[in-house]
Structures are given as C-alpha cells and as structure tokens.
Image (cartoon, grey):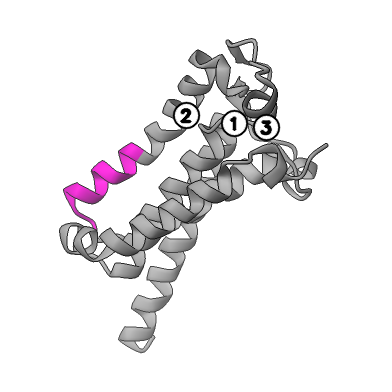
C-alpha cells in the first residue's frame, strides 16, 4: 500500500494552493464573516485540503489511467468501530480531515452567514461523495462510510470549539 501522499499525488500541490489562497483572502473573509483572520484562514485552508484530498485523481487514475467502477458502496451507514478510529487508515483520516472545519465553524460568531457556512460544510461531504460516484476517472469510490466519518469529524471539531468557547467565557467571567 502506498503512503497517503503517494496515493494522492495532487494533495500536496492542492494544499499549497489552499495555503496561498488562504493567506491572500483570509483578511477579507474574516471581515465578511466577522471573525478573526486566523479562523478565516483555517476555514479556507481546510476546505482546500478537503478538496485536494478527496476530489483530485488518485495515483492509479493519474499515472495509469485506472478508473473506479463508479456507484456508491453502502455497506456501512453507522459509526465506525473504535478500532478503526485509533489506527491510521481511511476511516481515521476521513474523520481527521473534517475536524479543523468543524472547529473553525464552531469558532465563528453566531450569525446567519455562519449558519450558511455550517450548512455548506454538511453538504460538502455529500458533494465530495457525489463527485467521486459520478466521475470514475478520478479513481475514487463513493462510500456511505465516508459520509459518516466526515460528519463525525465535523461534529468533533465543532464540539471542541464549543468547549473552548465555554471555557473562555468562564475565564472572562472569573468563574
């Protein structure tokens, strides 16, 4: 089995592009979202990382022209077993990939714009799986397990952000 970067050769270039776009646009996005440039940067770079990791061709498709069969694997709909979360594999990487996005969303102020960003984040996992299902030339496969794992990552990141906000609020009040 190839390592992650070997399996997805366009991930690193995509991440670099996301980083540059994040640096260039974070201040404007921060003003628009009424948040800090750091949170805006995290949002932008993580969406770019998600796209680079999930909708670029895998190595077999890019280097050898091997396409996937298309369709969607519906074998797992529930949460992954704990053993899959604690080892480095597709399951844990799918969870980890979406944690920063959930964290950034949880750090946004409670506004209508933030609600739209949260809705987009939830839709993003469906969009990614749809692209993987309908573009077999990417060599990717759509899996309901990925929907669950990505959503779990979003929820974990959001939960961490809510915890941070609660602790920060208590510290401000001196509780």
Q: Quadrant of residue 146?
A: top right
Judged by depth in the image, the label closer to the viewer, 2 or 3, is: 3
Label 3 Cα neighbours within 10 Å, binned few <14 / some 14-19 / many ≥20: some
Report the side of 37 relative to 65 (left or right).
left
In the image, the segment drawn in magenta is 110-120
Residue 62 within the magenta-colored segment of the rendering: no
Which residue position is annotated with label 3? 59
Dot 1: element = helix
Q: Quadrant of residue 24?
A: bottom left
Dot 2: element = helix
Identify the mark nearer the N-term, 2 or 3.
3
Which residue: 34% across, 76% down?
169
Quadrant position of the C terminus in the picture: bottom left
Which residue: 17% across, 64% down?
31
- Of 19 and 134, nearer the camera is 19
- Of 34 and 29, nearer the camera is 29
Spatial CA distance of label 1 from label 3 is 19 Å
Which residue position is annotated with label 1? 146
Which residue position is annotated with label 2? 128
Judged by depth in the image, the label closer to the viewer, 1 or 3, is: 3
Residue 67, how many percent across, how many down?
Answer: 64, 16
Identify the mark nearer the N-term, 1 or 3.
3
The answer to whether 127 is drawn above or below residue 162 in the figure is above
Which dot marks residue 56? none
Q: In the orientation shown, which residue stands out farthest toward the bottom?
A: 174
């Amino acid at each position: 089995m190839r390592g992650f970067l070997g399996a997805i050769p366009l991930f690193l270039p995509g991440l670099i592009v996301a980083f540059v776009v994040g640096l260039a646009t974070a201040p404007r996005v921060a003003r628009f979202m009424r948040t800090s440039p750091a949170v805006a940067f995290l949002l932008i770079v993580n969406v770019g990382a998600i796209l680079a990791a999930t909708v670029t061709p895998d190595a077999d498709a890019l280097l050898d022209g091997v396409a996937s069969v298309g369709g969607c694997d519906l074998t797992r709909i529930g949460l992954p077993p704990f053993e899959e979360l604690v080892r480095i594999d597709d399951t844990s990487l799918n969870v980890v990939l979406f944690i920063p996005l959930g964290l950034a969303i949880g750090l946004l102020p409670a506004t209508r714009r933030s609600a739209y960003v949260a809705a987009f984040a939830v839709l993003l996992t469906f969009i990614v799986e749809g692209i993987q299902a309908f573009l077999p030339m990417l060599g990717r496969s759509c899996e309901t397990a990925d929907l669950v794992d990505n959503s779990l990552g979003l929820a974990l990141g959001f939960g961490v952000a809510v915890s941070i906000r609660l602790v920060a609020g208590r510290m401000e009040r001196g509780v």
